Every structure is written in C-alpha cells, then in structure tokens.
Amino acid sequence: MVRVLVTAGPTVEALDPVRFLSNRSSGRMGYAVARALLARGHEVVLVSGPVSLRAPAGVTHLGVESAREMLRACRDYWQDCDALYAVAAVADYRPKRAVLHKLKRHEGEGQVIELTPNPDIVRTLARSKQGRLVVGFALESRCGEVEARRKMEVKKLDFVALNGPEAQGAERSSLLVLGADGSRVELGPTAKPGLARRVVRATLG
C-alpha cells in the first residue's frame, strides 16, 4: 500500500464577489482515479476544486477553490505521500486584482481585466519528488503529443496522460499515456472509471 495525493476538478479564480475565471472540468477523471487507487488498497488524499461529485468513501478529502489554495493544500500532504496524480485542470491565470464589489456594466464601455500567472502545481511539487512517482495530466488542442512530452521533460514528470478538449465533462474518454522512458500507451475510448483503472495500472503497476 502506498499513500497517493490526487488533485481533481477545476480551480476558480475570483474576479469580484460574484464572477470568476474557471474551465469546463467536471472532476470525473480525478475522482475516478481516486476510486481506482482505493480499489487497489492504497491510501488516497483527494484535493479537489469545486465539483458536483461526492468524494469517494475512504479518501481524505480537501475542497479548495483557487490554484493557490490547491497548492497550499497539496504542500501540506505531499511530504507524507508516495505518489502524485495531478489530474486537476488548474487555471493558468487569475485576475491580478479581485475587486471587493460587483463590477458594474457601463453602457458602450469595455472592461479590461489584467491577468497574472498562477503557480504551476505539478511542477512545484515535482521539484521535491525525491524518487516519488509523479503523473501529470495534460489537455491539448493541437500538437498534443509533442507538447505533452515537452511538459513531461520540463516539469520532471514520470508520466503524462494526454487527452483533448472533447474530454471536458464527458463520461467516456481516451488517453495517451506517455512515459519519461519513451513508452507510449493508448487507452480507451471507454467510460472514465475503466479508463482510470487502466491509467493506474500503466503508471503505478
């Protein structure tokens, strides 16, 4: 048995008290990975952005909203974990300033929102992996395999599971699992629970 940290769902970046920047991630894949790991007898810490899913019984579950909150939660647990599955769709950017009151519409006028980069969670955690397994998930709309391999090398990941925009919110999906050793395994299309089990077998053994 190993202790595994799993991130799931989107992050939500506040613009004002009622608006935010986010993405279409449903969290299904991350939650399916958590269940697949539990079924194999592993201990799971699930750090999740806002989703409409119920956390699997038996996991240590932490709900967060922003990328910075997710990173803080992950740091608290990573030092005591043996592996990381970074499935969450973390927003690359957040508004540079979140205003305290609802932004008002002014007829005929546009609105300029300045963005600033969010922390790269998987890259940050992988810097201190010290031999631990790190599996990243990537969604690409073009040059997917080339871009996924670039990310794997730059971020020092052991594996990257690659999919496309059609996976967002879908119940069935496909994945291309790329390994730092040059391996290449195509999975699916199949329902996400089955896909998650195959990903775990392909990466954790």
Image (spheres, rainbow, N blue to C red):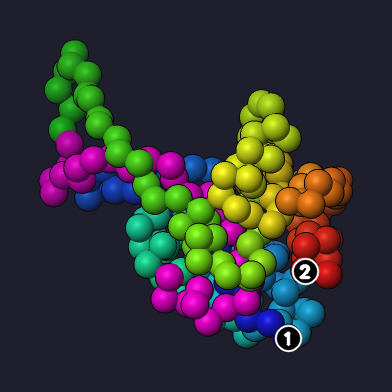
Residue situated in front as seen by the camera: 158 or 57: 158
- Give how far apart the Cα atoms at labels 1 and 2 are: 11 Å
Identified by mark 2, the residue type is Leu
Q: Mark 1–mark 2 contact, CB under 8 Å?
A: no
Residue at the location (50% across, 60% down)?
127
Q: Position of residue 166 (x, y in %)?
A: 69, 36
Which callout, 1 or 2, points at the residue further toward the start of the chain?
Answer: 1
Q: Residue 48, how many percent across, how many down?
A: 50, 64
Q: Where is residue 85 in the image (x, y as percent from the top left)?
A: 63, 63
Q: Can residue 109 be seen in this view?
A: yes
Q: Name the residue under label 1.
A: 1
Residue 170: give its label: none
Q: Is residue 189 left or right of residue 121?
A: right
Based on the displayed image, in which of its 4 quarters is residue 205 positioned?
bottom right
Residue type, mark 1 in image: Met
Callout 1: helix, strand or loop? loop
* Residue 26 to residue 85: above or below: above
- The residue lying furthest to the top in this view is 108
Relative to the observer, which residue lies in front, 103 or 29? Answer: 29
Q: How crowded is mark 1: few (under 14 residues within 10 Å), some or many (20 or more)?
A: few
Q: Where is residue 9 in the image (x, y as percent from the top left)?
A: 54, 56
In magenta stretch: residue 101: yes
**In which quadrant is the N terminus drawn?**
bottom right
Task: Give the residue at x 71% y 54%.
Answer: 159
Q: Quadrant of residue 201?
A: bottom right
Q: Residue furthest front?
A: 130
- Left or right of 36 on screen, residue 19: left
Which region shows up in magenta?
Answer: 75-103
In this figure, which residue is indicated by the disc labeled 2?
Answer: 204
